[in-house]
Amino acid sequence: MTTRDFRLADFLPYRLAVLSERISRRLSRIYEAEAGLSMAEWRVMVHLARCHAVSVREIHGCANLDKPRVSRAVSRLETAGLVEKTGSATDQRLLVISLSKRGRALLDRILPPAIAYEARLLAALSPADRAALDIILEKLHRVLDADAQARPRSRLDIPRDTAE
Amino acid sequence: MTTRDFRLADFLPYRLAVLSERISRRLSRIYEAEAGLSMAEWRVMVHLARCHAVSVREIHGCANLDKPRVSRAVSRLETAGLVEKTGSATDQRLLVISLSKRGRALLDRILPPAIAYEARLLAALSPADRAALDIILEKLHRVLDADAQARPRSRLDIPRDTAE
DNA sequence: TCAATACCGTTGCAAGTGCAACGAAGCGGA
DNA sequence: TCCGCTTCGTTGCACTTGCAACGGTATTGA
């Protein structure tokens, strides 16, 4: 493989980036056009739906967003009345963030179509494909896990039921 | 699946985005720290290595970069002496962009480690995994291809040897 | 020939990003 | 108790992005 006949379209990092971006953009039409949410805000809300009252740090560590992004996303969401910020009683440094009633109502509206779109993608794959994909993504992550120069994986992104 | 037990970490678009970004960031250490290239500049140069003298429009259509990004990337690369811009003789609107001697030399230096890193990723996959991945990525792309609300796929990203 | 139209690359601008640095708050050892 | 060290969330800042609009050039059709 010389420099001259290297094909960008065959390069795995590029291929993943292109597909991922294409999917993300399509998906963002659901939560952006419908609810005015950015991807960061979307991730924060979705995370909050499950992990009810958490700190900025927690979201940062779980949703693959850096601290400033979480902080700003939470601020915007608070301004929009979708999220509530409370100081922790036990540790004054901590912030306790949770969905407001309106926030949950909004999520109840936009999460189903997002899940439906994922289902549409998954429907194109056979059960064997889906199983293979899980394994492949995990194997690629492991390469990065073993690479000190790569960014560490978020805690929640590590499958719990898989051998270390 | 209710709103309350939806897990972000299981959501395919999120999973692809996380893995893709992790890989892209790791890879960018190679061309960024080593040569000061952004991802856009990297893609432009790599595309030029194969498609020697092309227009901005061409790169835009092939490397998944919007026109302004290509335009600015090319300008920076030209300033850095890595790329040459010439007006087309037949159509004065067109720009003919090609790697300079220095540009090619730089690419000859940074492409091999990038390819080596891809190889490192691929080495974690069995031949069957790799074949499955090709099929899976293509199937997912097809869903988007059939979706008018999704962004169309770049020409070069469509495999040539696959049935329509 | 000459408008009307389409296309090319660039630029403006508002918004988003990533990184580092900051002040505030807890923690720990002397 | 008090001083250094860590952690929390925020902010500043320089830079990148994405979109739309622009001027310049070709093309089309009457």
Image (cartoon, coloured by chain):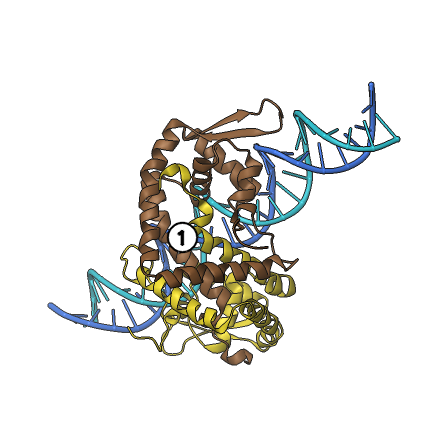
Chain colours: A yellow, B brown, C blue, D cyan
Q: Is residue B22 above or below residue C30?
A: above
Residue situated in front as seen by the camera: B140 or B59: B140
Q: Quadrant of the image for the C terminus of chain B? A: bottom right
Q: Is residue B80 above or below residue A141?
A: above
How many numbered marks have been drawn onto this rendered protein structure? 1
Amino acid type at mark 1: Ser
Residue situated in front as seen by the camera: A114 or B140: B140
Residue B61 visible here? yes
Residue B48 in the image: x percent, y percent?
Answer: 46, 36
Residue B18 visible here? no
**Quarter location, residue A79:** bottom right
Give the labeled residue for mark 1: B24
Identify the subunit bearing mark 1: B
Q: Is residue A91 above or below residue A43?
A: below
Secondary element at tag 1:
helix
Residue situated in front as seen by the camera: A17 or A45: A17
Question: Residue at the spot x=31%, y=54% of the render?
Answer: B120
Residue A98 in the image: x percent, y percent?
Answer: 50, 75
